[in-house]
Amino acid sequence: MEGKNILENELNYDAHKTLGEQDGEIVLNDSYSLIDDRDSFDKGSDATRKEEVRRQRREKEIRNLKASKAYKFISTVTTLADKYFLDALLGLVPSVGDLVSSIFGLPFIYVTLFKVKSIPLTLAVIYNYLVDILLGSIPFFIGDAIDFFSKAHVKNLDLITRYVEGDKKTIRQVRSKALLTAFLIIILSVIIYFVFRLLIGVTEWTWTLLIDMFKWLIGLF
């Protein structure tokens, strides 16, 4: 009988030990789960803080850019050249008018290249100006009429503003078309070169003809 009691006690001890180990294991696993949850929460908080820091830094960069003299200058150029039609009026000067008006685009290129520091955006701005120059070079005052409606400065200022403000659609379009834009810039540059060579030649011939006619008329008297 006594041996039987000893055997039962040993069995009960083993059972309690096993349950204790199992309970301990459960508690241990629960503690690990809590630690994992806390780590996940901390990581989520860190990601949120980093995102907030990036957002604040981005907003500061935008404010600094818009407050810079360069940005204010291109805003003024846009107002004078497009909204008050100074660009279109300069385009009325044969041959050289469009080239002179294109100088207004240099500050925009400076902003995109050295302030925003974006080559794709710079390419997009240059492309818009080359298209404007080519359209303005169409003879018989057709190009001059187009200049009154083709507002390249307004288009580029809006493009720069949307890009620096983080408009995802604008950024995606500008970056995805960078290589194509670079290729089109080369093509447009070659076309514009030959077009202006032709226009300058035609202008020189026209002025020579007018001077000869004027001399002939004077010779009649």
Image (spheres, helix red, strand yellow):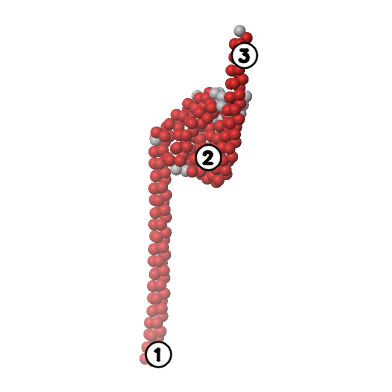
Q: Position of residue 196 (x, y in %)?
A: 58, 31
Question: Which of marks 1 and 3 precedes in the sequence?
Answer: 1
Q: How far is the residue under mark 3 from the one under mark 1?
A: 145 Å
Dots 2, 1 in contact, CB < 8 A? no
Looking at the rendered structure, the kind of residue marked 2 is Ala
Residue depth check, mark 2 versus mark 1: number of the one nearer the observer:
2
- Marks 2 and 3: which is nearer the front? 3
Question: Is 133 situated left or right of 14 in this image?
Answer: right
Residue 126: which disc? Answer: none
Pointer 2 residue? 124
Mark count: 3
> Residue at (59%, 27%) from the top-left corner?
201
* Crowd around label 2: few <14 · some 14–19 · many ≥20 (10 Å): many
Residue under the point 38% across and 79% down: 17
Disc 3: which residue: 216
2 or 1: tag closer to the N-terminus: 1
Seen at 47% across and 43% down, the residue is 118
Q: Quadrant of residue 184?
A: top right
Give the distance between the C-alpha atoms of the residues marked 2 and 1, in whole angstroms. Answer: 94 Å
Q: Which mark is residue 4?
A: 1
- Whether tag 3 and tag 1 are in contact, CB under 8 A, the answer is no
The local secondary structure at tag 2 comes to helix
Closest to the observer, 135 or 35: 135
State the CA–CA distance, disc 2 to disc 3.
51 Å
Return the x and y of residue 95 as percentages of the image width and height.
56, 27
Q: For residue 100, say whether it is visible.
A: yes
Q: Position of residue 73 (x, y in %)?
A: 43, 31
